[in-house]
Amino acid sequence: MPFVLAALVLAWAVMLLFGGLEFDRGLLLFFYAGDSPRLAMGARIATEAGSARALLAVTAIGLAILFVRRDLRGALLLAGITLTGRMLVTLQKGWIAHLRPEDQPHLVAAQSYAFPSGHAANATLVWLCLALLLPGSARARMLA
């Protein structure tokens, strides 16, 4: 577990230090999906999985399941992590203030700063919490 946390901290530090350099722009251009209809559709689907609408819906479903199971601790964890994570991402966006690149047209309209990615961070928080809190057995949690 300490190794995983150290790896996450290291990855976050690298993104903070090198995220706005030309290397970042090169990766953006390399992975840009707007010129390919199939890739663009996949990018839109992945983006929707991290949208506020989708995350609120799956969080509400997860909370309902946890309440039906009478798992108040799990419900509080899911709600607390989701809300706290969302606030921290918003605060970091304002602190870092990394503008979105304008080299290519955006596939999905975005109104906030580019980094950290709210879609990626919030989706990771919610989907990971659901994967860890909803499985009933320890074996199922290990698989999740």
Image (spheres, helix red, strand yellow):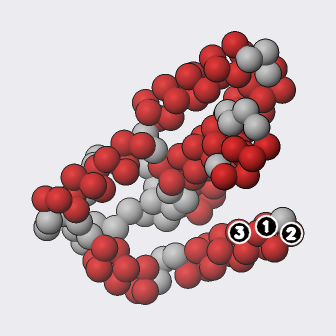
Taking the spot 37% from the left edge, 49% from the top edge, the residue there is 47
**Res 69 quadrant in image:** top right
C-beta proximity under 8 Å, tags 1 and 3: yes
In the picture shown, does residue 73 fall above or below 137? above
Q: Quadrant of residue 127 in the image?
A: top right
Q: Residue 56, how many percent across, how many down? A: 52, 28
Q: Secondary structure at mark 3?
A: helix
Is there a contact, CB below 8 Å, between mark 1 and mark 2? yes
Which residue corresponds to the image point at 59% horizontal and 63% vertical from the top-left?
Answer: 96
Secondary structure at badge 1 equals: helix
Q: Which residue is mark 2?
A: 2
Does residue 58 appear left or right of residue 100 in this picture?
right
Position in image of residue 53 (x %, y %): 43, 30
The quarter of the rendered structure image containing the N terminus is: bottom right
Instruction: Note whether 125 is above or below 130 in the view shown.
Output: below
In terms of depth relative to the viewer, which is nearer, 20 or 141?
141
Residue at mark 1 to residue at mark 3: CA–CA distance: 5 Å
Question: Can you say whether 101 is above or below 51 in the image?
Answer: below
Between 72 and 95, which is closer to the camera in this rendering? 72
- 10 Å crowding of disc 3: few (<14), some (14-19), many (20+): few
Q: Amino acid at mark 1?
A: Leu
Residue 28 in picture, x, y percent from top left: 34, 74
Q: Is residue 80 visible?
A: no
Position of residue 97 relative to residue 88, above or below, is below
Q: Amino acid at mark 3?
A: Leu
Residue holding disc 1: 5
Tell me the SS state at disc 2.
helix
